[in-house]
Every structure is written in C-alpha cells, then in structure tokens.
Amino acid sequence: MTSKERMICALDRKIPDRLPVVTHDVMPSFLDQYQDGIGAQEFLQKYGFDPILMINMFQAESGQWMEQIDGMPMIVSDSWRISVEDVSGTEYETRRFTIATPGGELTMALQKNIHTAWICEHLVKEKRDFELISRFAPWYRADSLAINSAAEEYGDRGLVRGIVPSFDIYGQPGCWQDLACLFGIEKLIYAAYDDPQWVHAALAFLRDRKLHYVESLEGTAYDLIELGGGDASTTVISPSIFREFVSPYDAAIIEAARKVGQRIVYHTCGGMMPILEDIADMQPHAVETLTPPGMGGDVDLKEAKRRIGSRVCLIGGFDQGRYFTETTPQETRAQVREAFEAAGSDGGFIISPSDHFFAARDDLLRAFVDEAHRCVYPES
C-alpha cells in the first residue's frame, strides 16, 4: 500500500498492510532547534512517517477580501477591518489586534514564545461584544480550486488534511472550543450555568458560520478535516456540559461534512474516557488524540478500542513526552508494540504522538517509526 492508501484504509476502519504512523503537524520550533530548520515534509520523509499535508485555503464572499495580517490570511470587509500593533514592556512578544466595525471596536491580544502563542486578552470582554461579531464578522468559504491543485500535486504521497476554521486571529475548530477562546474558558463555564441562553445563542452563530464553510467543501480533495479542541475535554469541563453545549453543535457540523463527502476527525486533547461514547455518537470518522495519563490525559487505549473502536478510527495514544526524550530505543519500541496490541489488532488505528511535541531524540524517533513499520497485519 501507499501511505495514502494505508491511512485511508485505517480511517475507514479496515485493515491495512501495516500500522500507519503519523504525527499531528510538526512544530516549527522543533524543526529549527532539532532538525536544522528543514521543512515539515522533509522531516516526515527523513524518519519514514506516513506523511500528511496540512493545508487551509479560504476565499472571500462578494464585498469582502483577503488580507495578510501578522502573517495570517484573514477575510475583511468595510465593516470588519483588522489592524495589529506591537505592545512593548511585556515579558513575551505581545501583539494587540483591533477589529473596527460600524458598531464599535473589539480588541484581542496574543503573546508568544519560540514554541507557541496564547491569548492574554480575549476578544469578547462582555457578552454584548458578541453582538458585533454576529452582525459584522465575515463568513469563510473554502478555496476548493487551490486546495485541489495542492492535493493533485501532492498525489499519493500521503494524506491531505484540513481544519474547520477557527475564529479570526485565534481560536479552535469546535464551536464550544472557539467560544472559549473568544470569551475565556472560566467565564464560559460560569455562563453555561448563569446564562445558558446566551451561550446557546453564541454557539449557534459559530455553528452556522462553520457550517457555511463546511458546506462549501463539496468536491474539495481533502482526505480528513479536523474539528474539536482541548477546551471540550473532561480535563476542562464536565460530561454534562459536553452533552448540552458541545456535542449538539459539533454533531451538526459532522453531519454536514458527511453530506458533502468529507471525513471528520474529532480532536480532544486531554480527558476523553467519560465522553468516549458521546464523541462516537456525533459520528466522526476518527477521534484523536487519545492522550495517555503520562501526558496529562486519561486514555486507556485497550478500553477505548473496546468501547468505540468498532465505530471510529482511533488516532494517537502515544506518550511522546516520555518516549521521545527520556527512554531507551528498546523501551520506545515496546511502547509502540503495546499500543498496537491494545488498539490495532483489527485495523482502524493510526499511531501518533498525542498532539504536538517540542523536543525529541533522533534515536527515539527512529525507533518509534521503525517499530510501527514492523507492526504488520497478516494477509487476508
């Protein structure tokens, strides 16, 4: 099998020739610090990963246009103008974004270090700020021609993967998760109890905006689209909040994706075991990241496979914090084999680090990938 065939076979819960082995994107800081600045595709080829091309290309509706703002493509209009300025005197590099609308301004600030960025000032300070978003924010469409051209050039080398767009500047693909980035997760949890009507209204707007994008994906040559995000894990919220405020909105997006022929992977970094069936009930094609306790999650791979493995493909499950940096190659190999025996016996499993990693030893990376290559399935 080619890498593309192997991964699609697993995504469709069938048995490939061997265990597919991937990583969830490759962090630029890791490539700069540990790989002499090579590109992500060169890194995947160097170690023998089944490669994935991550691409997201958007187009504007009539009366809107695309601008590069702080290195990010964003859609703007006369009613939604975005500017950015540096903020001095802070420990970390800080930028404040201002969105000008006919009804007033919204501001958000991000900080970053060499590894990642985070929000230090949320866009929605008061609930009424969301009214400006619902009135003036532009809606995104996929640039299918550009995506299809990139996918055709990539060919059978690997999987072509995208993401349901998060909100402008900074967000997550899931509805609840995106709102958490806009409003702040602590405030959002309080609001779920104190003003659930407002939370549902905000989630419905974000859902509809994402549905507009997903419905534009018909005929687009993606193999897998990511939805979800860490703010819906049970490390952060209760299963009851998940069932009321997360799954109804994200399930609608998954249903729309299926209607236009797209596969969805639901991404939940953190606790998953109390909501495994709830995630599967949304009917994604795959779930990730299956984060083990050593990485701050709670996933037991064997139990997850038993409970939902007949319904969805499982992606992830590997403790990269320990087995990419601290152990011997033999221990890393043993952990790969243990994961394969727990979740991969009848296909439908793609081994992967549970989300991003920022450090890794060369010998352990090679042991991880090589042992996955050795996890073969008998010929039928």
Image (spheres, grey):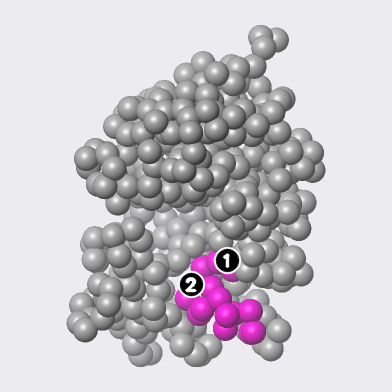
Which quadrant of the rendered structure holds the C terminus? top right
- The residue wearing badge 2 is 181
Q: Which residues are magenta?
A: 174-191
Q: Mark 1: which amino acid?
A: Asp
CA separation in Å, label 1 and label 2:
9 Å
Judge the density around disc 1: few (<14), some (14-19), many (≥20) Cα neighbours within 10 Å: many
Is residue 93 found left or right of 312 in the rendered image? left
- The residue wearing badge 1 is 231
- Percent coordinates x, y for residue 159 in the rendering: 46, 33
In this orientation, does residue 23 appear?
yes
Q: Secondary structure at mark 1?
A: helix
Is residue 190 part of the magenta span, yes or no? yes
Is 123 rendered above or below residue 330? Answer: below
- Percent coordinates x, y for residue 77 in the rendering: 30, 72
- Percent coordinates x, y for residue 378 in the rendering: 67, 12
Rendering quarter of residue 345: top right
Asked whether disc 1 touches disc 2, contact meaning CB atoms under 8 Å apart, the reply is yes
In this orientation, does residue 161 appear?
no
> Depth check: 355 or 78 in front?
355
Is residue 17 found left or right of 113 in the rendered image? right
Q: Mark 2: which amino acid?
A: Cys
Say which residue appears at 49% left-offset and 38% top-offset: 327
Rendering quarter of residue 191: bottom right
Is 275 rendered above or below residue 353? Answer: below
Is 235 rendered above or below residue 137? Answer: above
Say which residue appears at 34% left-offset and 78% top-offset: 109
